[in-house]
Image: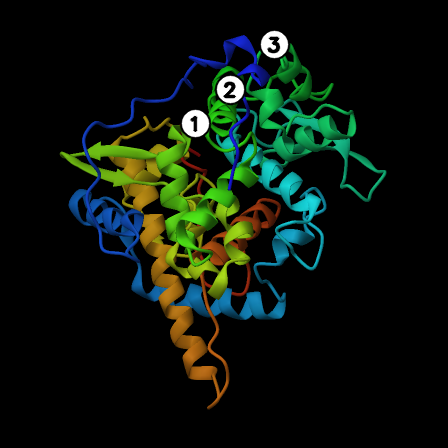
Amino acid sequence: MAVTPAPESLPNEYQGAEDFNGKEIPPGPREAFAEGINPVLETSKWVVKDIGLVGLNEGGILSAAKYIHSQMQRESYTPRTWRTHPLHLCPAEPFAWDDPSTRACLDWIFLISSLNFSFWSELEGQPGRYGVEWREGWDSERIVVHTGYWSLVAAVDRALEEGIPITDPTFYAFESRCPDEVFEHVFRPAAQSIEGIPLLRERIAILRKNGSILCERFGGSFYGFIDAFRSRYGDRGTALQLVKMVTDAFPSFRDETVYRGRRDMGWVLPALVRRPASALPRRGAIHELTMFADYRVPQILHHLRILSYPPALVKLLNAHTPFASGSQEELSVRAASIVGVERVRQAILQLVADEREDGQEEDVVSSVVIDFYLWDLAKRAEGLVGGVGGVETAPMLPIHRTRSIWY
């Protein structure tokens, strides 16, 4: 049971903490869905059909599924691959809720997930883009400049190494303990960078709000939130139930848009829920979750011919035309990506079923793991002439550009 800190232990500015600078949360109740049905997937299917801009390529889905399945097998790519990234902070093994490293890891994951958005740069591929100079990983002494998502992780890890408790909600929630100047120091750019981290003020506001919620309701830690979740569902909760509880509690994760009077829900938090969900019974039904509809995975989905774009959309992407948040172009690309990865998952499930021998345990294939693999593949493909090899592809297009706190 989480314990809320006594009022006298909280700084004066705790009450009425400033809200984050995001879009207004759509009014009115959410559409009701049956237990185990992911509203993100269902509303995405509707958006894809209603707008009719981005298509799903049946032949591309099948060929990409075969390629992804074989590559993931060849590379032994599993949910545990997340632990192998040298910058990631991981709990001790075997995993135990009462191990001190679990609390530290959950708070690290929560902060990273709260700030994991909008790292694209107008200076893509140039040394002047925002980057963070730090070690190549926790176990390395080699200093490199990290960009994109890795700039966030490196900045947080560097701060922890410097003795700044940046992942502690009781620290970052309150300006008296963590002035804005501390955030500016934590996210300071490398000497070669001529731009700072995008949306710094919005990031600060989100951390203030999310940290305040954790302090007020969950004992000042994301561990307390997970403890409350476990208590609510008697240690039988699923990953989808965890996502719903996160979006109910923290507005900055409530990625929702009203389109033609209906909510399109994009709350997808695989990095935030995968670690605690994996410790739940039956791996927390992680297969119920969707992919994370960002700007990088849709790029590789089109490259692998899973998604098909009309010439007008291709022209906009090649011209680096910004897409407004909630526009038909942005909604179409993101919704089709969610549906496309789910279709790939279903195709891989069929491949696995065809390969499985009698009596062999059934594998659980999740869109979350496929999403992680596709993101890694997209980053590798950036430096490859002609893109990904070994599978039929379309020309690699630029990412869609939407400056947003949602992804």
Q: Secondary structure at mark 3?
A: loop
Q: Secondary structure at mark 1?
A: loop
Query: Residue 238, percent across and down?
Result: 41, 56
Is any part of residue 387 visible from this angle?
Answer: no
Q: Where does label 2 land, which residue?
A: 208
Q: Nearer the viewer, mark 3 or mark 2?
A: 3
Query: Residue 17, percent across and down?
Result: 45, 14
Q: Looking at the rendering, which quadrant does residue 343 occupy?
A: bottom left
Amino acid type, label 2: Arg
Q: Where does label 3 land, which residue?
A: 176
Task: State the CA–CA distance, disc 3 to disc 2.
Answer: 11 Å
Q: Are marks 1 and 3 in contact (CB under 8 Å)?
A: no
Q: Give the residue displayed 83% in from the left and 42% down from the top.
A: 140
Callout 2 crowding tier (Cα within 10 Å): few <14, some 14–19, many ≥20: many
Amino acid type, label 1: Ile
Vertical arrangement, residue 354 with respect to residue 230, above or below: below
In the image, 120 versus 95, the foreground residue is 95
Amino acid type, label 3: Ser
Is any part of residue 159 visible from this angle?
Answer: yes
Q: Secondary structure at mark 2?
A: helix
Query: Residue 380, percent across and down?
Result: 60, 49
Task: State the CA–CA distance, disc 1 to disc 3.
Answer: 25 Å
- Mark before the other along the chain sequence, 3 or 2: 3
- Mark before the other along the chain sequence, 1 or 3: 3
In the displayed structure image, the side of residue 324 where residue 407 appears, left or right: right
Disc sitting over residue 405 in the figure = 1
Callout 3 crowding tier (Cα within 10 Å): few <14, some 14–19, many ≥20: few
In the image, 374 versus 222, the foreground residue is 222
